[in-house]
Image (cartoon, rainbow, N blue to C red):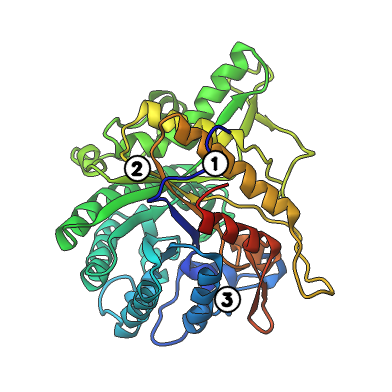
């Protein structure tokens, strides 16, 4: 690499989500979320885990901030739990919920850690789901009102806002495959959910700007760059379709380009209902894009002419979640975003790896594979920077082992090892290594 240093204004951070770390699901007036309901159903979560206690950060957040100080990070990306603020999604506001996030923000600022707030990271109030959830356009209005409440309370201290995290997961894992809450399997509904979430994003951007005039506002999308398995027309066509369905379906509408045509045609009668004003509502200017990257897809269509698309990759180079390790994909993704779009800032808002971490006799967790994973991906960010891409921050997923959605506590991504029985956090070797990088601002 020609340059090993990052820009002087670079943000080094970690990322978390409310349901995955907070616990305290029935404390201080918090309402039920779709993930509380989903996790309570037998067989939905590996090991039968639920969101309680998770990392119990609702009470132990000072412990987590001390971890961040040890890591030397200057930013923390976390999400607000909608049912902690407005227990039923609409109606009465819960003062204790807002007080909690105010305490958290103040504690971060006291130690010079910049809060990056995600307003929605999948924990929809269950009461709204019972009225149709994100498939019901009334949820757009409820979300905008919730945004107004939170931005009005925290906007004097929080200046960086992310409206949604990974709408692809909200729509397709929650409403097509059923792997995530609310556990439904209906493609037409999934596409309508995706559309309604994008509309709510645009409406929320305007509210945040009104309440916080000096705010920086953006959205977080997950990307999976596609690569054709062979140099054939069939594989190229299949890769283009994957790209439009997975990546551009959520990206193009928020920059005013509408839905990509190949995917729109492929979805047929299942395309969402789009009202006349929706295209404009989805696309107010934003200040940055959050980029979540974990792996790529290698796409192969064995000449079936629109039949089943098969995914293949290097099966000998994978994480514990069976995700291929392909750092080059991050560089390719960042360069593509910079060449084809006009975002003034990109943040790598999530990137990380799960491994079968164990506490050894010396009281430490030795995770050289994770160190190598982070090192390789940071090298790709440096390469993208050298090519003129405006990357301004990196947020490792995640701070400490937590409740990893359908995988429960069995999947460990953290820089800190969580002993869930005692809630002790132990920094892994990767955490100590990451701390050296953050303090040096160099790889």
**Dot placed on the residue nearer the N-terminal end, 3 or 2:** 3
Query: Between marks 2 and 1, how big is the CA–CA gap?
Result: 20 Å
User: Which SS class for mark 2?
Assistant: loop
**Dot placed on the residue nearer the N-terminal end, 2 or 1:** 1
Looking at the image, which residue sits at the far right? 361
User: Which SS class for mark 1?
Assistant: loop
Residue drawn at (67%, 17%) of the image:
230
Q: Nearer the viewer, mark 3 or mark 2?
A: 2
**Dot placed on the residue nearer the N-terminal end, 1 or 3:** 1
Q: Residues within 10 Å of mark 2 (few under 14, many from 20)?
A: some
Residue occupied by mark 2: 345
Q: Nearer the viewer, mark 2 or mark 1?
A: 1
Location of residue 368 by image quarter: bottom right
Residue drawn at (42%, 65%) of the image:
79
Residue occupied by mark 1: 4
Q: Please state the horizontal and vertical placement of residue 338, each as a whole percent of the image.
A: 39, 31
Q: Residues within 10 Å of mark 3 (few under 14, many from 20)?
A: many
Query: Between marks 1 and 3, how big is the CA–CA gap?
Result: 35 Å
Q: Which circle marks residue 55 in the picture?
A: 3
Q: Please state the horizontal and vertical placement of residue 100, each as a whole percent of the image.
A: 37, 81
Left or right: residue 401 versus residue 86 is: right
Residue drawn at (64%, 12%) of the image:
232
In the rendered image, the vertical position of residue 395 relative to residue 326, given as above or below: below
Query: Is residue 171 visible to us here?
Result: yes
Q: Nearer the viewer, mark 1 or mark 3?
A: 1
User: Which SS class for mark 3?
Assistant: loop
Query: Between marks 3 and 2, how big is the CA–CA gap?
Result: 32 Å
Q: Please state the horizontal and vertical placement of residue 238, each as a whole percent of the image.
A: 57, 23
In the rendered image, the vertical position of residue 213 relative to residue 372, given as above or below: below
Location of residue 409 by image quarter: bottom right
């Amino acid at each position: 690499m020609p340059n090993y240093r990052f820009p002087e204004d670079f943000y080094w951070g970690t990322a978390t989500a409310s349901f995955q770390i907070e616990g305290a699901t029935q404390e201080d007036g918090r309402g039920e979320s779709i993930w509380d309901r989903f996790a309570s159903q037998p067989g939905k979560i590996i090991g039968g885990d639920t969101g309680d206690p998770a990392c119990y950060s609702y009470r132990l957040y000072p412990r987590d901030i001390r971890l961040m100080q040890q890591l030397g990070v200057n930013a923390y990306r976390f999400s607000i739990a909608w049912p902690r603020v407005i227990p039923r999604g609409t109606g009465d506001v819960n003062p204790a919920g807002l007080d909690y996030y105010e305490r958290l923000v103040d504690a971060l600022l006291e130690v010079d850690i910049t809060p990056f707030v995600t307003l929605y990271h999948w924990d929809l109030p269950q009461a709204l789901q019972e009225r149709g959830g994100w498939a019901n356009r009334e949820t757009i209005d409820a979300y905008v009102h919730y945004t107004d409440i939170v931005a009005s309370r925290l906007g004097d201290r929080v200046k960086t806002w992310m409206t949604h995290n990974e709408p692809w997961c909200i729509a397709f894992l929650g409403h097509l495959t059923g792997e995530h809450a609310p556990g439904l399997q209906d493609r037409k509904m999934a596409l309508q959910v995706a559309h309604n979430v994008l509309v709510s994003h645009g409406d929320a951007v305007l509210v945040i700007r009104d309440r916080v005039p000096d705010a920086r506002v953006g959205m977080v999308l997950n990307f999976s760059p596609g690569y054709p398995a062979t140099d054939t027309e069939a594989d190229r066509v299949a890769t283009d379709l994957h790209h439009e369905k997975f990546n551009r379906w959520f990206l193009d509408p928020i920059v005013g380009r509408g839905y990509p045509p190949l995917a729109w045609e492929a979805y047929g009668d299942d395309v969402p209902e789009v009202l006349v004003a929706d295209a404009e509502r989805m696309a107010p200017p934003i200040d940055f894009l959050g980029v979540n990257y974990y792996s790529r897809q290698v796409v192969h269509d064995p000449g079936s002419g629109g039949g089943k698309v098969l995914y293949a990759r290097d099966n000998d180079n994978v994480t514990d979640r069976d995700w291929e390790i392909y750092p080059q994909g991050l560089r390719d993704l960042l360069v593509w975003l910079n060449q084809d779009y006009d975002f003034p800032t990109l943040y790598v808002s999530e990137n990380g790896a799960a491994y079968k971490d164990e506490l050894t006799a010396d009281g430490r967790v030795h995770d050289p594979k994770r160190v190598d994973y982070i090192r390789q991906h940071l090298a790709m960010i440096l390469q993208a920077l050298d090519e003129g891409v405006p990357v301004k921050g990196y947020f490792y997923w995640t701070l400490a082992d937590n409740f990893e959605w359908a995988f429960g506590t069995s999947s460990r991504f953290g820089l800190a090892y969580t002993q869930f029985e005692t809630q002790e956090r132990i920094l892994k070797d990767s955490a100590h290594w990451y701390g050296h990088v953050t303090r040096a601002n160099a790889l």
